[in-house]
Each structure stands twice: as structure tokens, then as C-alpha cells.
Amino acid sequence: MAEPNVIVERDGRIGIVLMNRPQALNALSGELMSSVVGALEELDADPEIRAIVLGGGERAFAAGADIAELAAGTPISLYENRRIDQWDTIKNLRTPIVAAVSGFCLGGGCELAMLCDIVVASETAKFGQPEINLGVLPGAGGTQRLTRAVGKAIAMDVILTGRMLSAREALDFGLVARVVAKEAWLDEAKRVAHAIAAKGPVAVRLAKEAIDKAFEAPLAVGVDFERRAFYLARASEDAEEGLNAFVEKRPPEFKGR
Amino acid sequence: MAEVEVTRDGAVQTITLNRPDVLNAFNRALHAGLRDALKEARDDEVRAVVITGAGRGFCAGQDLAEFQAMPDIRDSLEQTYHPNIRAIRALEKPIIASVNGACAGAGLSLACACDLRIAADNAAFVPGFIGIGLVPDSGGTFFIHRLLGAPRAFEWMTSNRRLSAAEAHAWGLVSEVVKADALPTRTAELAATYAALPTRAIGMTKRLFDNADTATLEEQLALEAQLQAAATQTEDFREGVAAFHDKRPPKFSGN
């Protein structure tokens, strides 16, 4: 039997999805993306799962699009089959997703990492949008999300010259949240996911939604959304539990209600 | 004869710069040979590396005969010197520079990029660059600044003063000086000692010290904890603990 192209594990309240096309450095074929999206959707729908880790292998998170597929596609076939559109599904999932990045995180790989909520990187990670070297440009949000993450100056430099960013640069520029030793990338991402999973799921999901609003809505609208989300979270059983536990000096036990 | 000779004695790989007629000055062939040798050193069987020179010199730096032919010095440094300096720091094994004679210019940078320096008593250390109106390159300013501290490094590199092995030892540039004819034996002994240590932990220690140059205490504590977690997964850690309990010397495998 062939190796599955994604490996899905569960560890307590977190789900782990590892892309598994190592011989192709996890080039994001339509098939691989369908598996990734399918696995993430399934974990997102599972009430037991409160945070998800999405990773690749040691050598590559994902080195880019599947070049053969791209070369074989016509503009109309690429438009018709809506392969890129399925990526939008990821952004709409409610469970926080932590990208665990080791090695190459390029092109579509970088765009996929930027669709996640938090990026944890190995010191070996390399980020970039090298599409320009092939005479095209990022097609799954790269020009927009990289610019929002690192600002115009760096985004222009990276996308127009095709240069790669080291993990350290990516940290300094705000693309990633944490950089760890190359031995610890997956472990650290799991720790982040476990830390999130220990919080009240209602508040976590509302907070994720509110932060995303900062990029979608004018400030006043975002602030208004946050305030309403705050009142909503306050009405949850988890908020009751969290406040009581704080007063009683004991760890809270959140139920997701 | 190859410009770089590579020999293996047990777990020790010795890389000999081999252009003795020109005190092992760098040309393209020497860079390429060094690059291949450092690639070969990644072999798991290799647990310590020695870099030394053939004949009277360790390395006299750039071969000026080839220097004139460089169209773009920035590209040329990036293609020749930089990959090898990076490879020395990236190799997670101890690298010993066995300085057998003149060590000048980029040869000095090379020696200073290594983890340890041991010198023959007739070795000499010469900055070189400023003498022809150039700045130290190949990591020279980076490593010498860290080895000697900024004031002494600046004074030395700008004065272009020739430093004897004894002075280099007094300054802490080399950790040991031995009689010239005893250098190969002492180098082999030192390399064999390192080759018997827990290699993974040595490699991680090298990474930690490199990181310490720019890290905050908090960052360094975090990296130490991450690498300690990795170290506890090694066979050598199990062996070390077992040997301690059995009250016997540990026999590390490097895994």
C-alpha cells in the first residue's frame, strides 16, 4: 500500500496533520492539498480537538506548488478547477492552527503557513515566494498576506527578487512567532497547541476571529466586534469557571460551553 | 597532487591544505577541495576534524596571482570563502586548526573559524589584509573580535604585526603551543580525545556557544533547554549515565 500523503495523529486535545510527500519536499499537488484540507476540516469538526498542528517534514514544510501540475494547466483549466479556492476553507476553520515549519517553506508552502494562525519555525527554516523566478507570481494570497505580515518593504524585496528569508529574519519581520532549535520544531508547535487547548475554547475561537478582523475590517468595526465577542465569551460557562477558579486559586477546567 | 588531501584515522578526519610551494595560499582549486573535504566530514563515522597545512606554512591567505583575475570580489568571496567558513560553523563536530607555520590573511580567518587552535612554536600569525590596503574578510573581523575582544583585535588587525606562536598563546588566540616536530603527534592525540567524546553533545555545545554571541539570557536558556531535551535522547547520554552508575569510564559511540 502506498504511504498516505498526510499523516493525522491525535494527542489529547490537539490534532496533528503532517504532510507526507518527502520525496517531492511536500510540493502541494491538488491531491495533497485536498488531503490537507480534508484532514483539517475533520479535526475542526471534532469537539474534542481544541488546537491543530500542521507540519511537514524535517527538510521541508512545503517547497511550493507542484510545478508539473502548474505546467500542464491552462489558464482556463486553472480557473475552472478552482484548486486554489479550496485553500480559503482553511481560513474559515474555527480551531486555531499552528504551522510547524522546518526546512523549506516556499511559494505555496509559505502561503499555506500564512493561512495558519501561528507559525513556529525551526532555526533551519527558509521562507520565500520564489514564483518570480518562474515568470509568475504568488497565486494563493502571497502578495497580500506576506505584505500584511512583514510590511511593504520586505514583501517587495522578497517577492520581486525571489530571495529567501532565514528563520531569524522571519522572526524579526513578524512572519513567525517563535524560532527553536532544529530538534524542537514539532515539539514546540505541539506545546503551543497544548497551551491553546488548555484555554477556554469559546474565548479562544472568538479571540482568533477578532484578531482576523483586524485585517479585514476598519478599526472601529474591529473594536466593536471585539467588544461584542467579549460580552459573548463572558456569557459562557467557561468564563464562569475561569473567574471562579482564579478567585479560588485553582486551575480552571474548561468545557467548551 | 590534489590541492587538498583528506585522510582518515579512525574517527578523525585530517584535511591538509596542499600547495606547499605557495604556503598553501587559496586558489579556486583549494577552495573546491576544502569544500569537498568538509562535505565528507559530515559522515557519521567522522567525530573530529583537523585542518592543517603541508610544508612550511598553514595557509598564507589568498593567492594574489589569482586575485587579479577576479571580476567581482563580492561574488567571488560569496562563491569561494563564505561557503567553507559557513560549513565549518555548521559542522556539528569539533574542528581543530593545527597551525604548523605561517597563518596569514584569509588563512588566519580560516584558523579562527575553527573550534580550537593548536600551534607549532615556529608558527606565525599575520593579519596581512591591511598591508595591501584591504579589510579582513572570510569572517576575520567576526571571529578575531570574539577571540581577542574589540580593542586588541582592532589594534592587531590594523597594525599588521606578525605575532609569534608564544604571543598568540599569551593572547588566547591558540590554546596550546608545542615544538614544531611534536605538532603532528600532539594534534593526533588531541583529535583522538575529541573523537571519543559524546559527539552530538559536543556539536550542540558548539551551536550553543555560537548562539550565545548574539542571544539574550532568556533566548539562551530556551535554546539550552531545547538542546538538552535532544541530548537526553542520545545513546551517549544513556551510556554516560550507565557508566556513572557502574563506576566505569563511559564508552561513547557518537550517537
Image (spheres, coloured by chain):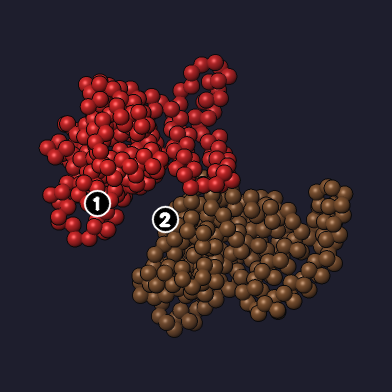
Q: Which residue is rendered at x = 71% and y = 66% of the image? A: A207
Instruction: Examine the rendering and report whether any part of residue B46 can be seen.
Output: no
Would you say B5 lies left or right of A27 here? left
Q: Which chain is red?
A: B
Instruction: Examine the rendering and report whether any part of residue A171 can be seen.
Output: yes
Could you tell me how far apart the alpha carbons at marks 1 and 2 are, in whole angstroms? 46 Å
Question: Mark 1: few, some, or many residues within 10 Å (few <14, many ≥20)?
Answer: few
Q: Which chain is brown?
A: A
Which quadrant of the view contains residue A132?
Answer: bottom left
Instruction: Name the residue tied to disc 1.
Output: B134
| Residue at far top of view | B247
Question: Exactly how many numbered labels are in the figure?
Answer: 2
Residue A256 percent location from the top left of the image: 79, 60
Query: Mark 1 falls on what kind of element?
Result: loop
Q: Amino acid at mark 2?
A: Gln
In this picture, is A165 found above or below A219?
Answer: above
Q: Amino acid at mark 1?
A: Leu
Residue B10 percent location from the top left of the image: 32, 27
In this picture, is A224 found above or below A179?
Answer: below
Pair 1/2: label in front: 1
Q: Nearer the viewer, residue A186 or A145?
A: A145
Q: Nearer the viewer, residue B45 or A175?
A: A175
Would you say A146 lies left or right of A68 here? right
In this picture, is B195 found above or below A213?
Answer: above
Instruction: Name the residue tied to disc 2.
Output: A23
Residue A175 percent location from the top left of the image: 53, 63
Q: Which residue is rendered at x = 48% and y = 47% of the image? A: B214
Would you say A97 lies left or right of A147 here? right
